[in-house]
Image (tube, helix red, strand yellow):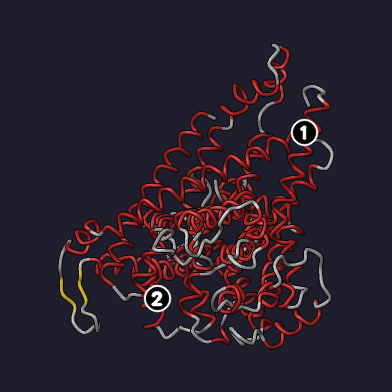
Amino acid sequence: MEKRVVFRSAWLPYALLAPQIAVTIVFFFWPAAQAVWFSFQLQDAFGLRTEFVGLENFKALFADPHYLASFRTTAVFSALVAFWGIAISLLFATMADRVLRGALAYKTLLIWPYAVAPAVAGVLWAFLFAPSIGIVTYVLKRWGIDWNWIIQGDQAMLLIVVASVWKQISYNFLFFLAGLQSIPKSLIEAAAIDGAGPMRRFWTVVFPLLSPTTFFLLVVNIVYAFFDTFGVIDATTQGGPAQATQILVYKVYYDGVKAADLGGSSAQSVILMAIVIALTAVQFRFVEKRVQYS
Amino acid sequence: MVENRPLLTALSHAVLILGVLAVAFPLYVTFVASTLRLEEIMSVPMPLLPGDQLLQNYSQVLGAGTTTGSKAPVSTMLFNSSVMAVAIALGKIAISIIASFAIVYFRFPLRNFFFWMIFVTLMLPVEVRIIPTFKVVSDLGMLNSYVGLTLPLIASATATFLFRQFFLTVPDELAEAARIDGAGPMRFFLDVLLPLSKTSIAALFVIQFIYGWNQYLWPLLITGDESMYTVVIGINRMIVGGDAANEWNLVMATAILALIPPALVVVLMQKWFVKGLVETEK
């Protein structure tokens, strides 16, 4: 889409674009280019000498069992976060779309966790599940469950999944609710007249019509699990125990900042960039499609 | 409502009430913990009714921080977080509204090139370029400063898109009329476009304020100095070790203080928040 009426000026558009382009170059393109450049280099432990090593850093990464394990951890983590985040919020949204009384109150009470920082969400849940003083731990212990996420990897994973899902439900909920409200009531009435009960109507009419929203949320939730959960992890498990919760982003941070391995960390950044670009491309192809059909 | 099924409606209410309670549970426990003495929290199980230390705990953290962890006062941190959130929100809105104005209302060489340049930044979240960005900021001497805290985060493709979409829906007749009346582009921008964009600006402000307030990784890297901590970083600096080593009552009071401002923004500006959220993701 283009404007028919435009203004003419030789310099004004450039001046208007200058601030954004300047920030973009200095803080996006220049660092991204440097990440690519560093990823081909090897630095010695003191940062005195750097050597061009080509693809060595990448080869070393894919030969490193820790890195491959981190890939697996990320896959498991993002699948769990996306699945539960979407399933729970779809349930809430469907129920909220049904009720007439108190709909706004429910909505308000369900959306506020969006405002909580991931790192703060991590602290809240870590406190509830704290191995010695946590209130949830106390209940679990009475049920005979030996709860200690500081030592047990599966439980640490469960903790960060719960905290991340809790924070993301509000976002998914709002999109599902908007999606549900845009479904024409006549379709659902037609199905009801044909004798389809509520369950049948949901699975054969409502759910297929929500599939664009669900797909969009799937991509958004995977991106969320990949990057935005850094705060949750750093505030709780810090990748432990024994790297059981070290997702890719956390490893980039750990190797680059804590272990000062510039080349290895940059190579990981480059791989992550490739993943984000792929995810964004998938999302945009899908958005184009939706525009065509609607 | 297609048909009246009282049982199903009752079930819906039950699920929603359970959901609301489950979602609020961590917040309630946090609030209770922030009103207790440390010994009360340490005696397992901790009480589930508020104690009498509310004023005590909150004035302690606001004035002096914790005693075992970070000693920076939380009032300073709240100030830093506010500066960061407001500067990022306003900065993003300002630079992207003028950039979209240029892209939509002018034809000039390299227009598409610039548009794509902004577009691809969507694909480069801070998290993937942590170390090089840190180097750039440190080379520019911006560590431990508000500029370093905000400037790298204000370039935003989403805001630029939102304004571009909105400007494309503004009727051409308005620009035409302005031109016939002899108004230049800036006059048109200030007197016509800006007032029309009020709702979009409000919606973006809400979303970006929360984004800025909740930043974690970036302030973690560049604020080495206690006086520059944001409140989200401050909480994590108060947690120094295992369960018994932390002053949980104070940590939890800080957590409540950290989530009140963005939660209020979401709840009070709900209409704009929902609009901003749904529209920036288009």
Placement of the C terminus of chain A among the 4 image quadrants: top right
**Residue A222, position as x, y percentages in the image:** 47, 48
B55 or B173, nearer to the observer: B55
Q: Chain of mark 1?
A: B
Mark 2 element type:
helix
Instruction: Return the x and y of residue B279 as percentages of the image width and height.
Output: 60, 48
Q: CA distance from mark 2 to mark 1?
A: 52 Å
Q: Which mark is residue B209?
A: none
Viewer-side label of 2, 1: 1
Asked if the residues shown at circle 2 and circle 1 are in contact, with their CB atoms under 8 angstroms apart, the answer is: no
On the image, the x and y values in percent for residue B46 come to 73, 67
Instruction: Residue at 64% x, 26% y: name it.
Output: A202
Answer left or right for A103 relative to A290. Answer: right
Question: Which label was assigned to residue B134?
Answer: 2
Asked if badge 2 and badge 1 are on a common chain, one would say yes
Q: Nearer the viewer, residue B189 or A130?
A: A130
Residue B56 position by quadrant: bottom right
Q: Amino acid at mark 1?
A: Leu
Q: Residue at x 51, y 75 (%)?
A: B219
**Please, what secondary structure does the residue beneath circle 1 have?**
helix
Where residue A266 sits in the image (x, y, percent)?
A: 30, 66
Q: Is residue B148 above or below residue A179?
A: below
Q: Residue B11 shows which numbered tag?
A: 1
What chain is tagged by disc 2? B
Is any part of residue B13 visible from this angle?
Answer: yes
Q: Residues within 10 Å of mark 1 (few under 14, many from 20)?
A: few
